[in-house]
Amino acid sequence: VRAEPSVSMHVRLARIGARAAARLCSRRQLSAARRASSTAACSVVAAAVAVAAGTTVAACAFDESPRDAYGGITVIVRETDDFEAALTASLDRWRRDGVRGVWLEVPAALVKYLPSILDRGFRLRGGDATHVLCCAWLPGGESPLPPGPTHQVGVGAVVTDRAGRLLLVQEAVGPAQGRWKLPTGLCEANEDVGTAAAREVREETGLDVRPAEV
């Protein structure tokens, strides 16, 4: 492994060069040599700072949440000049810091990054019209992270009046078109079953009902 010279070494070499020039040059030449030496040293320091800054940017190129109780973080991807390098640097840092699970939210406008994300061990978890969700288990081995949703929850409402009559609706479209049935539909994300049933009744009949029991 070849070690790169440090900033202080470059500065010392520049100063040695200036002292050597003092023995060989006139006073005017010496003044010019010192200015050149100072400029070279500053250039070396500036280059080193730029490299360090570039490394920091690559390792912090995403919006990260605080670590949760299970040692995981949620990360929102954003546009970056070198996405692959930024993700690789971030994964290295997360592993060093002991992060366990990473939930990566990829905005719909940045799905071009998905091939690189999947190549680095992430797997698809789900998403919606606004983003795709990927996850990775950094400690290795079998992942305990739950799989993505694979089904939807359907609801049906049994609505009666004081006379004991049952509310039915006639299906307007689909394979059951023309048939009479209970008001039915699908739960929305994070929606309570009873709330979903009441919503479907309201959407299909215009009636406001209150769930009595599930």
Image: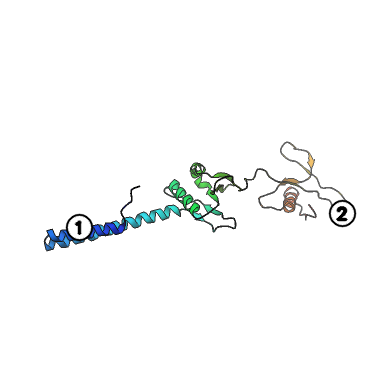
Give the left or right position of residue 20, taking residue 103 as reference: left
Place of residue 123 in the rendered image (x, y in percent of width and height, measured from the top left): 56, 44
The residue lying at 87 percent from left, 54 percent from top is 162
Which residue is at the front of the view, 152 or 119? 119
Which residue is at the front of the view, 117 or 25? 25
The residue lying at 12 percent from left, 63 percent from top is 27
Q: What amino acid is found at the position of numbered circle 1 in the picture?
A: Gly
Circle 2: element type = loop
Q: What amino acid is found at the position of numbered circle 2 in the picture?
A: Arg
- Could you say which disc has been placed on residue 17 in the image? 1
Q: Which residue is mark 2?
A: 162
Place of residue 61 in the rendered image (x, y in percent of width and height, measured from the top left): 46, 53
Task: Tell me which label, 1 or 2, sits earlier in the chain.
Answer: 1
**Callout in the foreground (1, 2):** 1
Which residue is at the front of the view, 4 or 68? 4
Which residue is at the front of the view, 123 or 4? 4
> Which residue is situated farthest in the top direction here?
175
Give the left or right position of residue 205, taking residue 84 as reference: right
